[in-house]
């Protein structure tokens, strides 16, 4: 981290200020506590479910995705019947200045490795 600190100094980035800015923008404080390590000696209770091998798991998720897609298609057909055909409007992307506003906060958080803060700010946008 010493090399990164010198890089942040060179780029004139204050890590604490970036963390504070992200907390203020998102309204969420960063948790200072460290997660506790799981005790490897404690056995988890068996929930009565059978263990699946790789092929069975793959088939399970393929079947789950297939049934989910069918349900979604049925819902879309019902909505289309009620409201008429879907109209898609063309959107034009605008050029964003990634040094100001929420984009700047997200960029600075990514630069210092605060992925959690960047994600919180992105979700707030």
Image (tube, rainbow, N blue to C red):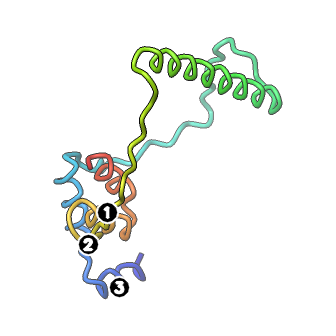
Specify whether 125 is left or right of 114: left
**How far apart are the alpha carbons under marks 1 and 3?**
35 Å
- Residue hosting label 1: 94
Q: Residue at x 26, y 72 (%)?
A: 99
Specify whether 111 is left or right of 19: right
Q: Residue at x 65, y 27 (%)?
A: 65
Name the residue nearer the viewer: 72 or 99: 72
Q: Are marks 1 and 3 in contact (CB under 8 Å)?
A: no
Against 122, residue 82 (above or below) is: above
Between marks 1 and 3 in the image, the one whose residue lies nearer the viewer: 1
Between marks 2 and 3 in the image, the one whose residue lies nearer the viewer: 2
- Residue hosting label 3: 6
For mark 3, give the secondary structure.
helix
Name the residue nearer the viewer: 115 or 36: 115
- Residue 121 in picture, x, y percent from top left: 28, 52
> Dot 3: few (<14), some (14–19), or many (≥20) neighbours within 10 Å?
few
> Dot 1: few (<14), some (14–19), or many (≥20) neighbours within 10 Å?
few
Question: Tag 3 or tag 1, which sits nearer the N-term?
Answer: 3
Extreme residue toward the front, this view: 84
- Residue 102 in picture, x, y percent from top left: 24, 59
Extreme residue toward the top, this view: 48
Between marks 2 and 1 in the image, the one whose residue lies nearer the viewer: 1
**How far apart are the alpha carbons under marks 2 and 1?**
15 Å
Question: Tag 1 or tag 2, which sits nearer the N-term?
Answer: 1
Against 35, residue 45 (above or below) is: above
- Residue hosting label 2: 99
Q: Are marks 2 and 3 in contact (CB under 8 Å)?
A: no
Specify whether 36 is left or right of 94: right
For mark 2, give the secondary structure.
loop
> Dot 2: few (<14), some (14–19), or many (≥20) neighbours within 10 Å?
few
- Residue 84 in picture, x, y percent from top left: 43, 22
């Amino acid at each position: 981290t010493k090399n990164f600190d010198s890089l942040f100094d060179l780029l004139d980035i204050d890590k604490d200020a970036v963390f504070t800015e992200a907390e203020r923008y998102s309204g969420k404080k960063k948790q200072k506590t460290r997660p506790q390590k799981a005790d490897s000696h404690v056995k988890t209770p068996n929930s009565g479910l059978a263990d699946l091998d790789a092929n069975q798991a793959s088939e399970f998720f393929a079947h789950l995705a297939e049934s989910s897609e069918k349900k979604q298609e049925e819902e879309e057909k019902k909505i289309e019947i009620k409201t008429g055909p879907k109209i898609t409007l063309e959107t034009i992307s605008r050029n964003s200045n990634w040094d100001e506003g929420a984009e700047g906060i997200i960029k600075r958080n990514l630069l210092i490795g605060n992925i959690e803060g960047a994600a919180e700010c992105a979700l707030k946008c």
